[in-house]
Every structure is written in structure tokens, then in C-alpha cells.
Image (cartoon, grey):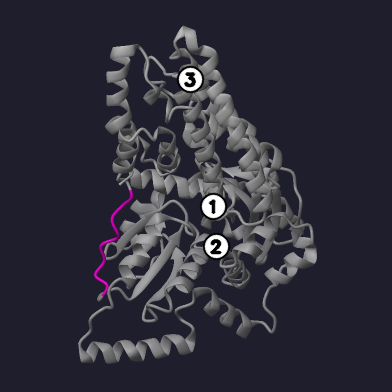
Amino acid sequence: MLTAGVDFLVAHSLLPLVSIFIEPAKVLFLNNAINHGIFSPIGASQAAETGRSIMYMLEANPGPGLGVLLAYCFFCKDDTTRQSAPGAVIIHLLGGIHEIYFPYILMNPVIIIAPIVGNFCAILFYSMTGAGLSGPASPGSIIAYMAMAPRDSILTVLLGVVIAGAVSFVLSSVILKATSGHTKSLTDAQNEMKEMKAQAKGEIPEPTAVNVGQIRKIVFACDAGMGSSAMGATKFHNRIKAERPDLTVTNSSVDTIPADADVVVCQRVLADRAAKCAPQAQLVTLDNFLADPHLDALYNALTSTTPALDAKAEAAANEEIVSDLRNAAVAPLAAAVTEASKANDSVMKIQAEDIQLGLPSVTKEEAIRAAGALLAKRGYVDDSYADAMVEREKLVSTYMGMGVAIPHGTSQKKGTVKKSGVVLLQYPQGVDFGDEKAYLVFGIAGVGNDHLDLLGNVCEILEDEDALEQLKTTSDMNYVLEHLQ
């Protein structure tokens, strides 16, 4: 469809309007089809005759993307995003990696208007002046772009980049100001871009092949079974319970997976251990427990078809559902809260002394050790527990997704835990956890299930994107306590 639209505009001498197709196609990673299918063949033919072609200028112009990034540099209200933009400008302009600005458009899709209009103005200018490049500019950096400019039109080519950048900058700035507060986070947009890029390359896995009629129990497994798997299980249960109330979704350590597990969800590095512990179960491996395409595939597979049961099996299933609902067995954290409540008159609650807000950005290890130090200061663990937290992070990341990390110790170091406790360290500028940024770092020390009720509150917050975003930057302690207690 995109190719047909571009072909029509080229054939009818409406070249500036191709920007309507080019800019969205770039963000959707479909630009190669247009470049190699239309622009390059026509450009090669024109260059052979005249020594230059405007076709080489249409998609490679760095001006439209530059304008978007500059607008974020000056007018974005989110500190993290604004501080990341200058580096993106350098990568885009000098490195020619245009996809660096795609997440900034995905954060606020209305901004796509800016590069469209910017490129339209540049193409119109190039058409009026008869400008063109002698060959394809690859990568699309300003250096490669100008290197392909014929000597007699270097200034014209450069002016076209400036026009595209200026128009895009002005429109992006206006849109940013007008739509402030209605955008995604940069991390979410980057994750969305990764998924789109993988899909464009055909790398997104097919929905997990499961026999939905046979699946009754799904177990989320992590190394210690202390927190990350519990949060993942709770969030997935909350997502699927309306469509599949017959499913039991729980969590465990990867080394103690129940024998009746039908599906085991774990991080990739734990796949071998999970397969050894639960050879009867299907494995679903992923990068994080909160936002991963494989979880979407599993959800789609489990909800796309209602499991077919005979009368006897249906009656048994209904009886099991009623029992599960009565006892809250399908909700791992709710069950933990119930048990903790029976053992204690009051469940564990996070206190103001367990929370530190507005911390400056540090390295991942420093953030983890800071969480361990606060746990020790509060009397939840021994001083050596921080070392166990760092060791645990080396095994598999405790980054959960959505800007949340929950570092905790290894299962072998549970003896250093004096009592259950959870602390929160807030980093408004974020802490790098690999390719992701964590803004909320929950340090966890667990004895039994006492800490899981608090993690359940965190899962509820994850369902409320506005509250989650507020928690990442707020300096209001009462607001934090209100949402976590």
C-alpha cells in the first residue's frame, strides 16, 4: 500500500507529498521497501543520465529527525527524556542512525506531523532548485549526505537540510507544549520500537503453542521465588482472570517448581534449570516478567480459544474453579496476604523510613548496594545481604519492566534475612539496568510470604500508568505511602 502510494505520487509529479508516506514508513521500519523498490531504481536511472537524482534525497535527509530531537532537547518537561536527546542528536546527525529518533515520535505520535511537513518543505525546495545527490547517502548522516552532493549544489543541499530541520523543530516544539502530560515514557517507547523492529524483520515469535484444554496451572519461576516471579504471576493473573478463571497462576523458585505445573514462565537464563525441575511442563522464556512479547503471545494463545471439555471434565473444572475462587488460590499474592493475616493481626506495611525519594542517578551496583544498606539499617538483614543482592543480579537481572526493579538476595543467603522487609529507592533520572532504566528500585528481604502483600500493592500500581509515572518522580512521601500501604 505504501509502495503503491509513493509510486502514484512519483508518476504524477507530486513528489513533495511522498513525505506523507516516507516519515511514517521510517518509524514503522518499512522504508527499505520504498527505498529499494522505488527510489533507488529511479535514482540510479536519473543519475546515469544527469549525474544526480532527487530520489536519493527523499528518505536520507537528516533534517526532519533532527528537528524532532532538538525540540525534545529544549521543550520536553521530562528530565530523563530531555537529557537523553542531545546524545541522540549526535548519533542521528553524525552517525546517520535515524532510528534513534523513532522512540521520541512513538512517545507522542502526533509529533509525526512535524517531520512530514519538514520533509515536504525540503523536497519542495529541492524540486524547485533542481537539486539532487550523485548517489545514495548511506548511512543517512549529514557527512554522507553532503559527500554525495555535487560540487555546484553543496550549499543548496545543505540549505534543504536546514529547512527540513527548522520546520520540524518549530512544529515539534508547538506539539510538545500543547500535548505535555499526554505522552508515553521514553523506556516504553523504546520497548515498543524494539518490538516493531523485530516484527518488521519477522523475528517476533509465533503465539506460544499450547493445548488450552490441558492447561490448568501456570507457574512463574525465578531464582529465589522471592519477588520477581510473584509480581509477574500476579500481574498475569490479573490480566487473564476474566477470560480464564479456571487457570491457577502462581510462583515458585526455579528449583522447586510444583510437579503439577503445565506451563512454566521464566527468564531465558533459567530455562535449563526450569526444564530439569519440571520436564513435564511447557517452557515460556522471556526477558522480563512485566512487559514481554512472549507474555502477550501466551495470553493470546490461552484466550483465543475456549478450552473444550466433556461434561465430566467441565463439572470437575467448575468445582475446582469455585474452590479456587473461594480460597483465593488463583491469586498468589492474595493467598499470601490471607496466610500472613491469619498468622498476624496486621500485615507488613512499608514505612516512611523505608523510602528514599529524589536520589541522584548512580550505577546499577551502587543502587543495589544502597537498597541493601537501607535494608540492613532498618534491621531486616545482615550487612552481608547487599553482597548477596549483587551476586543475584549477576545471575539474572531483577529488572521487571515498566521502570521497576526489585533486587534481592540469592536463595542460598536467606539465612542473612532477620525479618521480612521492603525498601524503596526512587531515582527520578533513572538507573541503567542493562538496556533499560529503573526509576523505582524495591529492595526485598523475605521470610516466608510476609512481603508479598506489599508487592501485590506494587502490581496494582502497575495497572495504573498515571500513578506509576507519578511515583517515579514525586517528592510527596504521603502520596507514596498512600499507594503502597
- Is 448 placed left or right of 16 in the picture? right
Residue position marked by numbered label 3 in the rendering:
129
User: For the residue marked with disc 1, what is the amino acid?
Assistant: Thr
The structure residue drawn at horizontal position 53% and vertical position 39%, both measured from the top left corner, is 117
Residue 257 position, x and y percent, is: 39, 66
- Front residue of 95/385: it is 95
The structure residue drawn at horizontal position 67% and vertical position 66%, both measured from the top left corner, is 419
- Front residue of 14/369: it is 14
Is 190 drawn above or below residue 50 in the view shown?
below
- Is 31 placed left or right of 479 in the picture? left
Asked if the residue under mark 2 is in contact with the one under mark 1, i.e. CB atoms within 8 Å, the reply is yes
User: For the residue marked with disc 3, what is the amino acid?
Assistant: Thr
Q: Sequence order check: which comes first, mark 2 or mark 3?
A: 3
Residue 479 position, x and y percent, is: 75, 66
Question: How many neighbours does mark 2 have within 10 angstroms: few (below 14), some (14-19), or many (20 or more)?
Answer: many
- Front residue of 476/341: it is 476
Helix, strand or loop under label 3: helix
Quarter of the picture holding the C terminus: bottom right
Residue position marked by numbered label 2 in the rendering:
227
Q: Which residues are magenta?
A: 204-212
- Is 253 placed left or right of 275 in the picture? right
User: For the residue marked with disc 2, what is the amino acid?
Assistant: Gly
